[in-house]
Amino acid sequence: NIETLAQRLASYKDKGAIGIGELMINKRIDSPFLQALFHTAEQLELPVTIHMSPEEGYMYGIVDEPGLPLLEALLKKHPNLKILGHSQTFWIEISKDAPTNKEDRYKAGKGPIVPGGRLVELFEKYPNLYGDLSANSAGKAILRDPAFGLNFLETYADQLFFATDMLNDTMVYPLGAWLDEQVAAGKLSQETYDKICFKNAQRIFRL
């Protein structure tokens, strides 16, 4: 509960925790409980990986509206809080034509990226926003428009991770092999590749 939240998180950090997540509580970002969690995470310097949902009572994950206004308010209010974004509802906002209905906001986008996406704007404005590339939600966002994807990776190289969404040897994540191919072909810089694959994690999580 909210009364013991700070004490519990502090005890987890004392036992070796280096971050929080994947955060999947199906409440709005501006709910009292999540606001308390984010405040405490900032105080304890624990990065938070979020799974995002379009609506309370729909699927799972913390909830924001189309255009991610609650996420922006959070990033602005807590500049020292590191948020790692994840899930279809987060990555669909990479394109300006992101849908607004809940069903399509929980699907991967398709087709060329329309410049001016809300997510790109947030990455540009808030250095405390990071992106987890490890699941297919991010993979499909990058691979739906490879030229745009390469530019996005190079531009925000310091804010992207190929992290660990889950351990499941039956699922295939094409982005991993694609990153290997692009760096081998000289289309993605070795510096960006190294940051995404391990250097950002070492820096942000103090590994």
Image (spheres, helix red, strand yellow):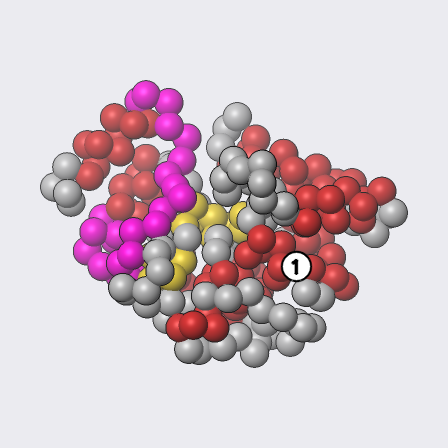
Q: Nearer the viewer, residue 140 or 81?
A: 140
Secondary structure, mark 1, is helix
Q: Residue at x 58, y 36 (%)?
A: 169
Amino acid, disc 1: Ile
In this rendering, position of residue 174 left or right of residue 41? right
The quarter of the picture where residue 177 lies is top right
136 displayed left or right of 187? left
Q: Which residues are drawn in magenta? A: 14-36
Whether 29 is among the magenta residues is: yes
Q: Residue furthest top?
A: 15
Q: Is residue 195 left or right of residue 24?
A: right
Q: Residue 39, image x and y in percent? A: 28, 47
Q: Could you tell me residue 22's position as x and y percent?
A: 40, 44
Q: Residues within 10 Å of mark 1 (few under 14, many from 20)?
A: many
User: In front here: 175 or 148?
Assistant: 175
Per the image, is 58 magenta?
no
Residue for badge 1: 142
Residue for point 69% across, 73% down:
112
Question: Horizontal and vertical percent for residue 71?
Answer: 39, 61
